[in-house]
Image (cartoon, rainbow, N blue to C red):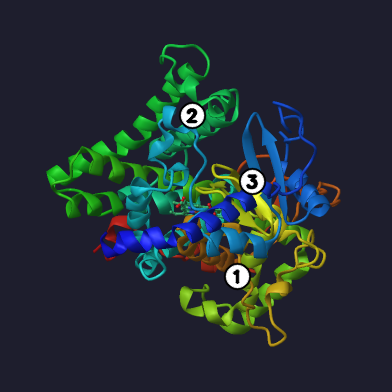
Amino acid sequence: MSVPLGLFVAAAPFILVLWRRFTRVLSYSPYPPGPKAYPIIGNALDIPLRTPWETYTAWGRKYGSLTHVTAFGLRLIIINSLNVAVDLLENRSNMYSDRPDMPIAELAGWDINIAALRYGDKWRRHRKMYHQKFKPESIHQFRPLLVTKAHELLRNLLQSPEERVTHLRHYPAAIIMYINYGHDVEPKKDRLVRLSEDATRMVAETILKGTQVVNLAPPLRHLPSWFPGFQRMARTCRQKVDEMQNVPYNSVRKHMAEGTVVPSWLSELLDANKSAGEDQVADIKGVTATSFAAAHDTSASVLQFFVLAMILYPESQSKAQAEIDRVIGHGRLPSFDDSDSLPCVEAIYRELLRWRPAAPLGVPHAATEDDIYNGYLIPKGAMIFANIWGLCHDPVVFENPNDFIPERYLTAEGTITDDRITAFGFGRRACVGRALAHETLWLAIATMLSVFRFAKAKREEGEEVDVDGSFTDSLIIHPQPFRCSITPRTEEHRKLVMNTPQIKLDSLQLYWE
Ligand code: HEM
């Protein structure tokens, strides 16, 4: 008998005892607490269709940091404590970095999107490309682009403040489209923006509405594509997603062949992979096309809530403006070099992400193994939601959590605290674009605050128009439409905006590798 085999035979009784003990623990461990489940349908009637984060937060108060619900055999675990989210999704990230199996996403062509990919080689390839482009050390190369687009945002707001929603959506769209494709986005009705928005809206609808059936019963994915209902919806969706990828891809390819290409993430990836096969080209098309969906609506959400917060909490606005005036004076706009000297501005950015986290439920993770945590069984395949909204509004951690109080991110000395920002998610699946989000949003917030006064709109009689602060019920939240006034703080500030340089983007040096 060889030595390793002999060792195994000698150890076999111990292994057996340990194995029995382990499987007994697993089979005896209860699921985390949760509302009473009924046979077959489980908690299908309890799972909320509207503002789910509110129900999940209420469950957290009732059942504790982990809640378990089930529907037709699908198991959901909701995390309502930051420590538990870190323990599971970060300290045990080897078991919690998967995404739920969503057959409909694949049918709809959305398996090009890293955020929906299962944990595996394809995800690793996509994540590596994202990381190389958007890691904190890399994104400084985009600063000239961000500054140019922030100046344009200021001019747009000065010229037509009533169109602020359009301007605040245009700013992050223009940044990510230029990074992806070297495409200078039209101020309105840009073709590539429309293609991306249409495709992502349709994917969201297809996945969310009317098609849950195929997620709950995966074999239905094998029904033929002409089959009415979800199959037909998914096919139309796939066409849109293909168009969203192929139109910019073909254009960049054509310009590369003609020698007239504006350097971009796509041209850089194609240059670096000249002999790329079909799969590699599909990866490259996928990452460049889906980063728009990840970056645009989330960043636009924060900017819309910024304006809302400034008019609902004017004292926060005045405090940050006093800081800007003290540090910078009136003759110039804030720049990235000022960021360490403007803690109140940074605190506003952080508080926005806490007060109204753009994605209140984040993106669900999935467990790849049975796990026991604090005596509870978290079964393999369970969908894991870190309830970001609940974590950000936990009254034990944040006093008066519904109020906008940037000071909670400032120490007694006035520096930024080291409290964690949870709005970007957890572990290996945490947002890979958070550094770009920070730079994009910080610059817009700092420059807008330096030159504009945000206030409630007034009726002709001088009476203020009330703003109730409500927001949409969607994967990415936005304020419900509201009126406000955006005016230059002084004539000097108006001139500062008017005199911002108008630079052609292709003249910028963005230091592509
Ligand atoms: C305020 C802005 C943003 C917010 C609040 C946000 C939030 C999030 C959240 C909650 C996740 C899921 C994390 C998890 O599963 O635990 C995520 C994933 C992701 N985000 Fe962001 N994000 C923002 C901006 C951006 C930007 C600018 C990019 C730029 C490329 C980006 C790219 C991604 C990608 C690619 C993923 C998927 C990561 C993966 O599954 O491995 N995000 N983001």
Quadrant (top left/top right/bottom left/bottom right) for the C terminus: bottom left
First of labels 1, 2 by sequence position: 2
Q: Is residue 276 visible?
A: yes
Amino acid found under the numbered disc labelled 2 = Ile
Amino acid type indicated by mark 3: Ser
Spatial CA span between label 1 and label 2 = 46 Å
Question: Closer to the observer: label 3 or label 2?
Answer: 3
> In front: 42, or 273?
42
Crowd tier of the residue under label 2, counting other residues whose Cα lies within 10 Å: few below 14, some 14–19, many 20 or above: many
| Residues marked 1 and 3 touching at CB (< 8 Å) | no
Residue 323 at x, y percent in the picture? 65, 79
Q: Which residue is mark 3?
A: 27
Q: Nearer the viewer, mark 1 or mark 2?
A: 2
Q: Earlier in the sequence, mark 3 or mark 2?
A: 3
Q: Report the residue that reaches farthest toward the bottom.
A: 413
Q: Secondary structure at mark 3?
A: helix
The residue indicated by pointer 2 is: 104
Depth order, front residue of 127/182: 127
Instruction: Establish if 68 lies above or below 347.
Output: above
* Position of 474 relative to 316 (above/below): above
Q: Position of residue 74 (x, y in %)?
A: 61, 35
Q: Amino acid at mark 1?
A: Ser
Q: Is residue 431 visible?
A: no
Residue reaching furthest to the front: 1
Q: Residue 264, position in %: x, y?
A: 28, 53
Q: Is mark 1 within 8 Å of ligand 1?
A: no
Marks 1 and 2: CB-CB under 8 Å? no
Q: Nearer the viewer, residue 390 or 17?
A: 17
Residue pointed to by mark 1: 450
Distance from Cα at disc 3 to Cα at disc 2: 32 Å
